[in-house]
Amino acid sequence: MIPQVADLLADDPKLTAFFADLTVGYQREWARYIFGAKADDTKARHIADMRKILAAGYKSKRAYGSRPKD
C-alpha cells in the first residue's frame, strides 16, 4: 500500500479498507493524481475527489466518470 495516500484516508476506516484492497496499479494511479498536482488548492481538490469516488465504490476516476448517469 502507498502510505502517503493511506494517511490521507486514515480518518475513515471504510475508505482505508477500500483503498487497501485496490491493486497496486490503482493505488499508484491515485498517488500520481494527488501528488502530481503542484498547487496546494489543486492537491486539496484531488484529495476531495478521491475520497468522494472511493466512497461511491469506484476504484478509479476513470471508472467513476464512466458510470451510468441518472
Image: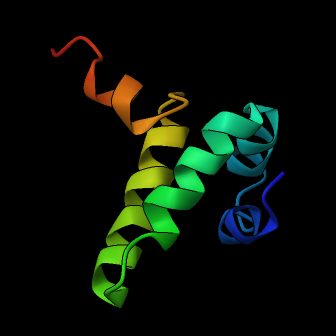
Quarter the C terminus occupies: top left
Image check: 65 left or right of 57?
left
* Residue at the limit of the structure toward the bottom, as seen here: 40
Q: Is residue 17 above or below residue 12?
A: above
Q: Position of residue 66 (x, y in %)?
A: 27, 19
Does 25 sit above or below residue 46?
Answer: above
Relative image position of residue 36 (x, y in whole percent)? 44, 69
User: Which residue shows up at 39% across the image and 23% down it?
Assistant: 63
User: At 39% across and 77% down in the image, what residue appears?
Assistant: 44
All told, the count of numbered labels is 0
Question: Left or right: 57 with respect to 27?
Answer: left
Relative image position of residue 7 (x, y in whole percent):
75, 71
In front here: 58 or 70? Answer: 58
Image x and y of residue 35, in percent: 51, 72
Residue 15 vs 58, above or below: the answer is below
| 59 relative to 22 in the view: left or right | left
> Quick one: which residue is furthest to the left in this view?
70
Q: Quadrant of residue 69?
A: top left
Q: Is residue 42 above or below residue 65?
A: below
Q: How is the image coloured?
A: rainbow
Who's the residue at 72% across and 68% down the image? 11
